[in-house]
Each structure stands twice: as structure tokens, then as C-alpha cells.
């Protein structure tokens, strides 16, 4: 399975821009990486469809974690699509926040459209670990 070294430069550059968008606190920057009818599904939940809903999904994390940082850990190209592996860190100081820091790892499996935007993203992370960290912080 090819990792970053054999990923086309255009795709690696796209993933780097996507990572920067995740750190930007500007939800539309994340959504603009998706096709207008693209979708984002997190942990098998209801998908956010279209850029407005995807921006809302990004906004929920950005609001909860005003200092949120996303790091691209690796990028893998497989027969099932592109796997974008990431680490998210931040302090839950948004409205109603716990004040605790989180550090979660996950990945998104992208199906890219012909125009070079994400057509479909299936995201996954350990939700029980995330909820534990929200309540108790990173240990």
C-alpha cells in the first residue's frame, strides 16, 4: 500500500491544504475541499452533505476547540481510496466546554471527484477515548 512517498505531489499538496484548513478556524476553508455535493460521514453517523453542512460539521469542532490543531500523520493510496490519517489536539474551551485537552487520532477515507475535490469522506476516530478525554483530559 503506497504511503506518502509514492503519493502524487498534487494529492499530497491537496492534503496539506486540507490540514491547514482544519487549523484555520474558518469552517468554509475545510468545506471548500469538497465538491459542491460532497459528503462527510464521521463514525458512521448521518452524513453532512454539501459544503454548507460540511462547514457546520467543521464549525462544531472549531467552536468546541478554539485552539484546535490538526496534523497530517500519513497519506495512503489504496484500492478503496485515499486514506488521510490525522491527529487533532485542542482544549475544550468553547461554549459549555470542559476546559480539558484532547489528543485524538483518526483517519478519513476519501473518494476524489474528477474535479479534484473530495466527493465522499468516511471519517473514523475512537469516540470513547474522545469522550473520556473531554471529561478527564489527556493522561
Image (spheres, rainbow, N blue to C red):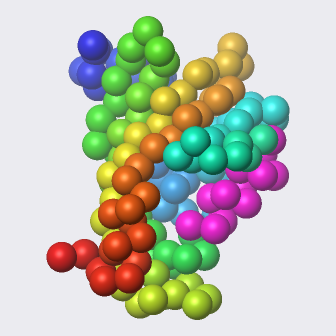
Residue 60 inside the magenta-drawn segment: yes
Q: Residue furthest front?
A: 128
**Could you tell me which residue is drawn at 66 percent across and 65 percent down?**
59
Q: Is residue 112 left or right of residue 135?
A: right
Where 16 sits versus 1, above or below?
below
Q: Position of residue 116 (x, y in %)?
A: 64, 22
**Does the magenta-highlighted stretch encompass residue 40?**
no
- Identify the image quadrant of the C terminus: bottom left
Q: Specify whether 60 is left or right of 66.
A: right
Taking 21 as reference, is 10 above or below it?
above
The magenta region covers 50-61
Image coords of residue 76 (percent x, y): 34, 24
> Which quarter of the rendered picture does the N terminus lie within?
top left
Q: Residue furthest top?
A: 79
Is 1 situated above or below 27? Answer: above
Taking depth in this image into account, of 135 and 78 the one nearest to the observer is 135
Residue 88 visible? The answer is: no
Q: Position of residue 66 (x, y in %)?
A: 51, 78
- Residue at 45% x, 89% y is 98
Q: What x and y, as percent, mark residue 20?
A: 48, 52
Let me know if residue 45 appears in the view. yes
Q: Residue at x 52, y 56 (%)?
A: 22
Left or right position of 75 against 10: left
Q: How many marks?
A: 0
Residue lying at 47% horizontally and 15% vertically, measured from the top left:
80
The majority secondary structure of the magenta stretch comes to: helix
Amino acid at each position: 500500500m503506497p504511503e506518502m512517498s509514492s503519493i502524487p505531489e498534487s494529492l499530497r499538496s491537496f492534503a496539506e491544504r486540507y490540514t491547514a484548513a482544519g487549523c484555520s478556524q474558518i469552517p468554509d476553508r475545510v468545506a471548500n475541499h469538497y465538491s459542491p455535493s460532497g459528503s462527510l460521514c464521521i463514525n458512521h453517523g448521518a452524513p453532512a452533505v454539501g459544503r454548507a453542512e460540511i462547514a457546520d460539521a467543521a464549525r462544531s469542532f472549531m467552536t468546541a476547540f478554539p485552539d484546535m490543531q490538526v496534523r497530517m500523520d500519513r497519506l495512503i493510496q489504496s484500492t478503496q481510496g485515499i486514506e488521510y490519517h490525522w491527529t487533532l489536539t485542542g482544549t475544550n474551551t468553547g461554549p459549555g466546554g470542559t476546559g480539558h485537552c484532547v489528543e485524538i487520532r483518526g483517519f478519513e477515507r476519501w473518494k476524489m471527484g474528477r474535479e479534484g475535490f473530495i466527493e465522499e469522506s468516511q471519517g473514523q476516530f475512537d469516540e470513547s477515548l474522545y469522550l473520556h478525554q473531554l471529561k478527564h483530559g489527556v493522561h
